[in-house]
Amino acid sequence: SVKEKRSVSYNPNLAKKQRLEIMKMVDKASKFSTYKNIAKDELGDCAKYVDIITKDSTGKTIKPIIDLNKSKIDEDLKYAGYNLLVTSEIDMDPLQVYKTYHSLWKIEESFKLTKSYLDARPVYLQKKETIYGHFLICYLSLFLSKLHALGYLEY
């Protein structure tokens, strides 16, 4: 069995941002009074705050009505700003887990840069040496662009 460690963090700035986003979605969802006025793709992310009622209290089928899901809204507002990080590094300090997680964007940015700007793929080469050379040039370019971005190099 895999052991895991869970770390919970709270960020008041994130909470403020998430609460504003939730309220924007609620406002958008509340503008739709009937199901006829709305296409499914128009709801987008705010669909989770909407219940479509098609039957009345007696079970009789009625014209679809859009109702706001108050309990879901309240739950999301309650947990705004909280983050749960799960890791298999059970000996790692929770603060280090948090810092490591929040530095992942740097790695993701490097992959994005390699994939798009440096044209690392697709590779139209056949010999092993030329493929290695291609990726060597791509990663050297990535390295030099990072050095430039950090201010160590000038053009």
Image (cartoon, grey):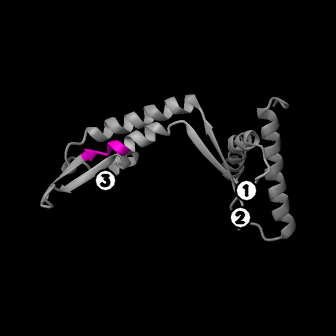
Q: Which residues are magenta?
A: 67-71
Measuring from the top left, give residue 32's x and y in whole percent. 24, 42
Amino acid on which disc 1 is placed:
Ser
Q: Quadrant of residue 103?
A: top right
* Residue at the (85%, 31%) spot, across then down: 152
Q: Nearer the viewer, residue 113 or 48?
A: 48
Q: What separation in Å lies between label 1 and label 3 (alpha carbons)?
A: 39 Å
Tell me whether circle 2 and circle 1 mark residues in contact (CB < 8 Å): yes
Amino acid on which disc 2 is placed:
Val
58 vs 109: above or below: below
Measuring from the top left, give residue 73's x and y in whole percent. 38, 41
Residue linked to disc 3: 40
Task: Please tell me the numbered disc located at residue 88.
Answer: 1
Q: What is the quadrant of the C terminus in the image?
A: top right
Label 1 residue SS:
loop
4 vs 11: above or below: below
* Residue at the (49%, 35%) spot, across then down: 18
Q: Earlier in the sequence, mark 2 or mark 3?
A: 2
Mark 2 against mark 3, which lies toward the viewer? 2
Apparent side of residue 103 relative to residue 35 in the rendered image (left or right):
right
Task: Please tell me the numbered disc located at residue 104.
Answer: none
Residue linked to disc 2: 2
Apparent side of residue 84 relative to residue 145 in the rendered image (left or right):
left
Amino acid on which disc 3 is placed:
Lys
- Note whether residue 102 is visible: yes
Q: Earlier in the sequence, mark 1 or mark 3?
A: 3
* Residue at the (71%, 68%) spot, across then down: 1
Q: Nearer the viewer, residue 32 or 139?
A: 32
Q: Earlier in the sequence, mark 2 or mark 1?
A: 2
Mark 1 against mark 3, which lies toward the viewer? 1
